[in-house]
Image: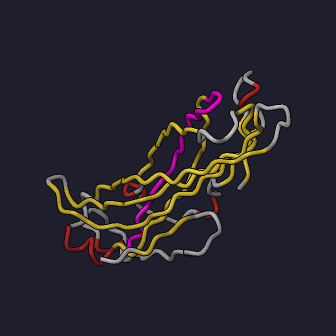
Amino acid sequence: MLNYIIRGDNKMYEGILTTGITELNSYPKVKYTNYCKQTMETDLLTIPFEKPVIESINEVRVNICIEDSHIINTLLGPKLILNCVKNIKVVYTANNAEQSLHSSYWKIPFCDFILLNDISYDDCLSLIKNVFLGIEDICINNCNDKLINISVLYIICPIIKEESCLKNHNDNKKQNYSFCNQYGKYSKIYF
C-alpha cells in the first residue's frame, strides 16, 4: 500500500511516499484480539559517510520479517518471543549541485514478545501455528543532513489453531484464516 506523509508546515516532510503499510483487508480475522500486541519502534538512522547529505526525502520503504520464534514459560504465563529484522530503505534527493537521487538501506534486528497468560504453556506449543505481523504506520520524526529519526508502528498477532481450547472463552467455533497476501507478513512457527 502506498501512502504519503504530510506533516505540518515543514517542507522536508511533505509528500514523502511510504511503502510497506499493511492494508486492513490483509489482516487475519482474529476473534480474541487480547493476544495481539502493538509496538512502536524508533530508530536513528545515519546516512553513510560516503553518500551525499540529504536535501529532501522522497520515499521510505519498511518491511519487518520474523526470523525465529519460541515460547518461554514465565511467572506471568507463557510468552511468545519473536526475533525480527526491520528492513528500511530511504530514497532521497541529495543536497548538491546535481540534486541526484540516492538511497540508503538498513537491516535492524530486534526482539518482541506476546504474553499468552490465559493459555497453558503446554497448550501454546500445539495451539499457535503461526504469527501475523502488520505495519500500521511509518513516521519520520526528524531529519537533518545525515540523520533520520523514524518510527514504525506494527502489530503482531499469533494465529491460534484451536481457539476452543482456551481456558477463559466459551465459544467452541474454530476460525478459518487466509494466509496469503502481498502486504501481511506471516511466519510459520516451529517448536
Which residues fall within the magenta stretch?
Answer: 143-160
Q: Residue 191 placed where, x, y %? A: 29, 77
In the shown orientation, is residue 83 left or right of residue 16? Answer: left
Which residue is at 59% across, 35% downward? 148
Residue 156 image point, x, y percent: 45, 57
Tell me which corner region of the image, top left, top right, bottom left or bottom right, holds residue 36: bottom left
Q: Nearer the viewer, residue 183 or 29?
A: 183
Looking at this view, name the residue that lies furthest to the front. Answer: 50
Q: Residue visible at 70% across and 33% down?
A: 54
Instruction: Give the percent coordinates (x, y) of residue 9.
Output: 74, 21
Residue 21 highlighted magenta (yes or no): no
User: Does the magenta-highlighted stretch encompass residue 147?
Assistant: yes
Q: With respect to residue 144, does 50 lie above or below? A: below
Outermost left residue: 75
Residue 92 sits in quarter: top right
Residue lying at the far top of the rendered structure: 9
**Picture coordinates of residue 118 (x, y %)?**
25, 60
Q: Is residue 155 left or right of residue 57?
A: left
Query: What secondary structure is the stretch in magenta mostly built from?
Result: strand
The residue nearer to you, when weighing 30 against 124, is: 124
Quadrant containing the N terminus in the rendered view:
bottom right
Front-lying residue, 166 or 135? 135
User: Disc count in the image?
Assistant: 0
Residue displayed at 26% across by 59% down: 79
